[in-house]
Image (cartoon, helix red, strand yellow):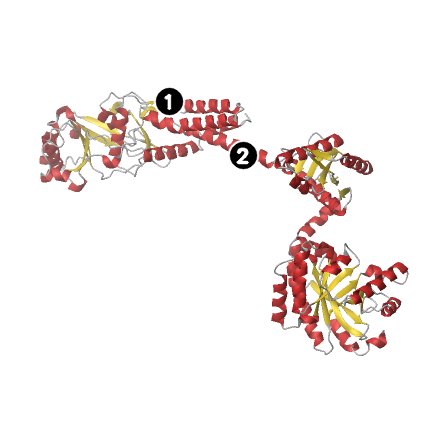
Amino acid sequence: MRSPIGISLLLSLALWPAWPLGFAEAIAHIYWNTAYTLISRSAPSSIVVVSVDAAGDLDSAGEAKILESIRRQMPRRVFVDMRVPYGIDPQGDTRLKRAVDSYGDDIGFVVRSSEMNTHDSSSIKIPTSEIFGSHKVYVSSWNDNFIHAVVSAPYSVNLDGKKYSTLSVALANIKPKSDGNYYPDFSVDPESIPTISAKSFLEGNLGSSILSGRTVIVTSSNGVTPMRYFGHRISPPVAHDIAGAEALSRGLNINLTFIPLLLLAVLVTAFAQGMNSRLRRVFLYLLIFAVVVFTPVEVRFLGIVLPPEEAIIYLMSYGSIRLWRRRTRRIQQTSLSGLPNFVAFSSGKMSGGYDVIVAVVARYEEILATLPRELHEECAKQIARRLSVGSGATQIYHGDGGHFGWCEEARPIDVQLSHLEGLRALFSAPLQVGGHTFDTNIHFGLDRNEGIDPLTRVNSALASANDALSSGRAVEVFEAHRLAEAPWELSLHARIDEGLRNGDIWLAYQPQWDFHGERISGAEALIRWNHPTRGFIPPDQFILQAERAGRIDALTYWVLEEAITAAQAVNALGPRFQMSINLSAQMVGKSDLVGNFREIVTRRGIDPCLLTIEITETSSLVDRAEAVHNLSLLRELGFRLSIDDFGTGEASLAYLADLPSDELKIDRRFVSRLLTSERDRAIVSSTISLAHALGQRVVAEGIEDQATFRLLASLGCDQAQGYYLSKPQPFDVMFLDYQARLDSWSRVV
């Protein structure tokens, strides 16, 4: 019963119209309304409706005159379907009685039910015999659906112990059944029913044989409620009577119930589900769908009622479940490898006593780019097989970017780390995929936090694997304290915006000393963050997050605006004062960088020559050509360029040769060992000489004592920066200090 067939069958039966949900009734209405909208034919000409509406309120004499006029036309039968005003005009009543009796057995009277689905004396009132006499009386009574559209009608109605035939049965001239219902043929277009105004009879404007041999229904819409007619507009009840007569005239009117179609749909889908050929399965699904949709309409014209709603609900449910399961399998399976992916990994149940491990293969995307697409699956499965053999895991999950995950029984941490190191050794042998050979380097992320939901554990191990890859470590263990910090780190960029608004993020300024001019000649603007609850947050903790979150651009432009304000205030005191700001290597290659810097300095009215841009983390430059282009344009605008932390990172000399610059900043790690290490002193001295040979100035940062300060002066360094001179200060403090000591700094030093 958990199969799509079982679930769909239960659902279709649960929505059966007899149950309170009643969804099947809505499906049936939509089905038949659509069918009869597309299928329409003219009403039979053998039945003519004579409408007395245009004749106004008729008395018994007026109705007698109409019946006399119709009698002269020699109709086959006449049914009087209107209110008979008997007992008001004795002469008119006599004339009406004579007119009715002149028809003999060829006339009958119609009474209508005042309520749908009710076929008893509470809704059907039979007038006294003074009106009908010995002539037959017929009933028009209907069953409707949830929006009052006519669905069926009884063959006959028992009222006070007497059985009355319904009008459609009389119109079809068949013998009524003792019980049961019939179903009208709504393909009959109610607009096409031949209709004549009784007023024409009264005025004598009709031919003498227009009703000859036909069945006539004399009717009035006064006091009669129109009813919904499938596939057409709301129509008077007489249209439904004629549609019912058309269905009954076929001689066969049987309701087979929903069981045959539903059973057929179940059997065909069960047979198709067991087939291996997808093309044949699709063919059978289309075939049974066509049978369910078209057969009920076709057999209805044979007089066979075959309700399709249960089978339609079954097929809809079956198809939806199959598609949902297929989509789920597709979501939980990596398409290229055929292995279950991390969605399946994180949605499974993880028992206690197990570690979650994620392995990441370095340069996996490059490996796939080298291989033909048809070998991608083989590549992933070879890696998964090695991991399965080494770990003993029966199921390996495959994620994007060369990630593979599994669960292992927890061991002591030293044993687990040793095990992963051994597993890593399995990948010392090259990977053979087709005719391609690859050396593989694999790193592991390990989550040991039991009791946490599987999704969090998988993501933790995934993050650890990425950290291990970026740091070059074999294994990275995701510690529990990182989970506590995760919400803070993941929302850091939003908190940065808040810090900028309320002033928690601000700029500190660290002065720079000019050895040649023997004065403070500038300052570096350094970003600071004092969080109201976490206190001071080191820049390296949030700058990296800002870069990852895409907030480094806004942060940089804010620093530039603030630094310009400070530079303008200090330069107003007289001596030239150079303001330095840091520019992340992530921004150097961006196409809008130069335009934004130009717009800001133009709007603020400052000479770009007063601003120095320090390029940080030069080893992180991705597009060196674009970086060189942008820096050259900034230099042409007048900005001074500085390579920060020179001597660290990768290829510092290569960047010095390629990047346009005016200044080098010697990293503090060389300056701090200047007095104790001859090698560091030689490196600093050589760097100063190299920079001067290239026409560049040198700034030494991290100076913390007078001896280092004096030694740098003797080596020919141009500028100094560090705690010996001043710690980074708020602008107001730095400005007042600079103003007070402008003329005395050299003596203090």
Between 515 and 496, the one nearer to me in the picture: 515
Q: Position of residue 721 (x, y in %)?
A: 80, 67
Residue 256 got which mark?
A: 1
**Image point (66%, 33%), residue name:** 378
**Of marks 2 and 1, the one in the foreground:** 2
Q: Position of residue 131 (x, y in %)?
A: 16, 30
The CA distance from mark 2 to mark 1 is: 33 Å
Residue 516 in the image: above or below residue 383: below
**Image point (46%, 29%), residue name:** 315
Question: What is the secondary structure assignment of the residue under circle 1?
Answer: loop
Q: Position of residue 219 (x, y in %)?
A: 20, 35
Residue 43 got which mark?
A: none
Q: Quadrant of residue 250?
A: top left
Q: Report the quarter where the C terminus lies.
A: bottom right
Residue 324 got which mark?
A: 2
**Image point (43%, 26%), residue name:** 287
Amino acid identity at mark 2? Trp
Label 2 neighbourhood size at 10 Å, few (<14), some (14-19), many (20+)?
few
Between 475 and 366, the one nearer to me in the picture: 366
Q: Quadrant of residue 679?
A: bottom right
Q: Quadrant of residue 513?
A: bottom right
Proximity of marks 2 and 1: CB atoms separated by less than 8 Å:
no
Q: Is residue 213 visible?
A: yes
Residue 17 in the image: above or below residue 443: above
Q: Is residue 340 visible?
A: no
Between 326 and 103, the one nearer to me in the picture: 326
| Image side of residue 176 versus residue 736, left or right | left
Amino acid identity at mark 1? Leu
